[in-house]
Amino acid sequence: MFYVLGDTLYNFRMSYLKSKLKGKRVLVTGATGFIGGRLAYRLAQEEGAVVTGMGRQLDRVPFLSAAGVDLRRADLRDTAVLRDLLTGQEIVFHTAAMLSRHRAALETALTINVTATEELLRLADEAGVRRFVHISSVNAYGPPQREIVDESHPLNVNQRDTYGRSKAIGEEAAWKTAAGLGLEMSVARPGMVYGPRGLSWSVKMVQVMQRGVPVIFGDGSGHAYPVFVDNLIDGMLLTAVSPQAPGESFNFVDPPVNWRVFFSHYGAMCGKKPRAIPVWAAKILALASEKLNLGLPLTRERLQYYVQQAVFPTTKAETLLGYRPRVDLDAGMAQTERWLRETGYLHNKARN
């Protein structure tokens, strides 16, 4: 009975979304990326919005043109082009960001994730945009200082990690700019976003597993913080239409799972057992990853995420937005595996 009621509420929420987004003019920055691409597709195909997607590598997303998305080549630093693209838009989803974690890239990350975001907000306000949804990250909190990391947890603008630091500074700057303009803004803070077309937490996970790189540090009991891409998109859509969303930030992370369970899915896909090493050895590996660019999502600071049992609850989104994750880890990984096989990232025999 509980599950039937839950599904009924979910279907009602989806109908509500369609009624609020249908015919709306929406701009998605970073539409050629993983999150932005999926968002633009769903807005155009499922919600009936009039979608403009901007990015730099339009040849990567032919499926968006086929879905009716108006694709425009644009750089976040090109004010004249942005001003033109924002004309007539009602909602902006700002998913574009620089993802590098290397400290040498900090200046560029700050230019993209902070300065360009502030300018985009100003141009959006100038164009009469009604709602601005900014995509931040739980990495903006920095390495967890407590087990429960809800939205009241302060952002860490001094952390070593370039991505987390620039996202924290960028989000604080965005809040200040939006407040000064009187522009309605909401913030989504996703965890490790995985799913079809995902690079960092899907493709790269398969690649490190296939190479036999250690992925379990210590006993693997620390908490991973994945979120399936469609669960995140559901939350983002709700922040765009809910009257309770302006002025609020929301965590979007699926239920807690430890690293052994998380990597066991990729291990099963590859036919390999995830390799484990002691924490002391992981610290050496993290340093090497930082210095030698080994392609691992691991630094000395990020190692703290792997060994802690932190939880990023979605209670606030559930209470204010009516959010609930509809795709569990097993189903999300199954969809991810199908895509990885279809695209050639996995060549071994599919598991039963």
Image (spheres, rainbow, N blue to C red):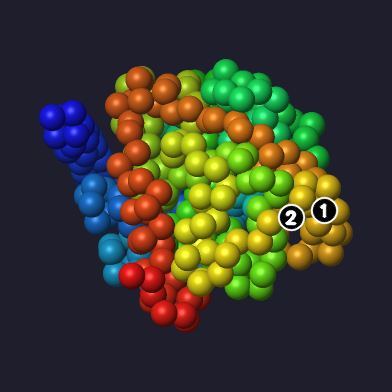
Q: Is residue 74 left or right of residue 87?
A: right
Q: Quadrant of the N terminus?
A: top left
Image: 226 above or below 143: below
Q: How packed is label 2: few (under 14 Cα within 10 Å), some, or many (20 or more)?
A: some
Identify the residue shown where x is 70% and y is 49%. 217
Tag 1: amino acid: Ala
Taking depth in this image into account, of 11 and 27 the one nearest to the observer is 11
Secondary structure under the numbered disc 2 in the rendered image: strand
Of the pair 42 and 151, the residue shown nearer to us: 151
> Along the line of sight, which residue is nearer the eye, 257 or 300?
257
Distance between the Cα atoms at labels 1 and 2? 6 Å
Which residue corresponds to mark 2?
277
* Kind of residue indicated by mark 2: Ile
Residue at 49% across, 37% down = 256
Q: Is residue 79 shown to the viewer in this render?
A: no
Lateral position of residue 36 relative to residue 18, left or right:
right
Q: Which mark is residue 281?
A: 1
Q: Residue at x 56, y 69 (%)?
A: 272
Residue 195: name its quadrant.
Answer: bottom left
Contact check, label 1 and label 2, Cβ < 8 Å:
yes
Q: Secondary structure at mark 1?
A: helix
Front position in the image: 210 or 340:
210
